[in-house]
Amino acid sequence: MLVNLLSHKNKNKELTDTLKAIAASNTIKELFHTSLNKTLEFLGAERGSILLFDLTSRELTLKIARGQEENLNRLGNTRQKIGEGIAGMVAQEKKPLLVRNVNRDRRFKNNHNRLNHYKTNSFLSIPLFMRETLIGVINITDKTSKKAFSAEDMNQLLILSSFISIVFERIKLLDETKEIISSQDALINTQLGKIERLRFEKNELDKQLNLAKKFASLGKISSGIAHEINNPLDGVIRYTNLCLERVKEDITAEYLHEIKGGLNRIADIIRSLLEFSRHDPMKKSPIDVNKTLDESLALMNKNLSIKNNAVVIKNYGQNLPKITDKGIKHVFTNLIKNACEAMEEGGTLKITTHKEATSVKIKISDTGCGIPQESINQVFEPFFTTKSIEKGAGLGLAICYDVIERYHGNISLESGIGKGSTFTITIPSENIPNEHQ
């Protein structure tokens, strides 16, 4: 059982590493190259190909192939009509295909001569979609072990193909965004003729684009991948606990505790991913900012009063208008939690709220250890953290940033080593219901 648990852990790590490699792709060409190589490596297969769907001609065109060097000249200009051949059939039916033995499968009795270059008789063929639109097909064959592909192999390829499709869409969106930004730059240059202003705005857009790259991929894959991993992870944790109940305190128990610790960390990251991807419907009733801050402080009261011995100073503005609830409480709770963790030896937490002409402003300051200047521009990026790996996955501030984006607002940070940190949140007046303005 211990061997099985370790095997599951290793397989999950391999899957995570494969997904990270695919997510790092910045161009379509790089995406297909990395995706096919990493997928073959993960599934233990020798051959594979990716074909893209041309909507105009309604044909599949071979974009990349691996392990078929002897056939590359013949395959180089391969085009397949929808409904013809294996990939064409998969594209037409828009359903994944697992063939354990092509010689015994009646669906391919007329294609035997076309398939006799395969070293094994088993293969996988999965359609790729951008949302609900077909973009292509990925084919995997010839397991290194010479065994047939299993249902588990197909499920793993389905996860990878879904992820490849999402990254494909992200790159497409980014390319379109770059074109828009390029057009906007030209328009600004023509209309304003102010080079310095153009440079400043371009730098700001570049920063937003870098964040958009990470949010576009993470936000879209979080829910699907998290749910795919969560169910088997729950089972592994449950059986680990059962093992711990039956094993005496010896080296085996020590190993199980290490496994459980790692699994719990994975579970925490999954919860953060689900939280990151969740966009709850907007609630109709507005919320009181000062009251919501007090509720967040109450949630963290144990950390503030016992662990950190922190002093809380509240400087709330009077007659503050209510704002629409789009998840601001999570932002408050996360920033207060971070402040607690930054003040391990105690300190002062100061919270200030006030209304300006076109916005509501909230400041949350601490006298903790602070953040290096070179890290300030990265703190809102997913998976960036200055904490140790045991204390966080680097998603807390990314979630805060995402929530404030829903308000079309702004969150900024002023900090320095030994100087503490101040987060400033600006909520525009458009989030204030008319009766409260």
Image: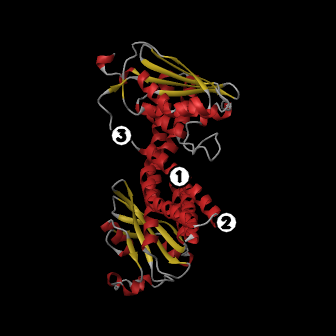
For mark 2, does the 10 Å Cα neighbourhood hold few (<14), some (14 to 19), or many (20 or more) residues?
A: few
Please report whichever mark, 3 or 1, sits nearer to the chain's N-terminal start.
1
Q: In this figure, which residue is indicated by the disc labeled 3?
A: 280
Task: Give the structural element (helix, strand or loop) at label 2.
Answer: helix
Task: Give the structural element (helix, strand or loop) at label 3.
Answer: loop
Residue 265 x %, y %: 56, 52
- Given residues 107 and 406, the one toward you in this image is 406
Amino acid residing under circle 3: Asp
In percent of the image, x 53 and y 39: which residue is there? 396
In percent of the image, x 44 and y 47: which residue is there? 274
Q: Is residue 324 left or right of residue 353?
A: left
In percent of the image, x 46 and y 62: which residue is there? 235
Name the mark nearer the viewer: 2 or 3.
2
Q: In this figure, which residue is indicated by the disc labeled 1?
A: 27
Please report whichever mark, 1 or 2, sits nearer to the chain's N-terminal start.
1
Task: Give the structural element (helix, strand or loop) at label 1.
Answer: loop
Q: Is residue 426 visible?
A: yes
- Given residues 69 and 174, the one toward you in this image is 174
Residue 41 x %, y %: 57, 68
In the image, residue 373 sits, relative to residue 20, either above or below, namely above
Q: Is residue 381 left or right of residue 373?
A: left
**Residue 251 numbered mark, or none:** 2
Which image quadrant is residue 102 in? bottom left
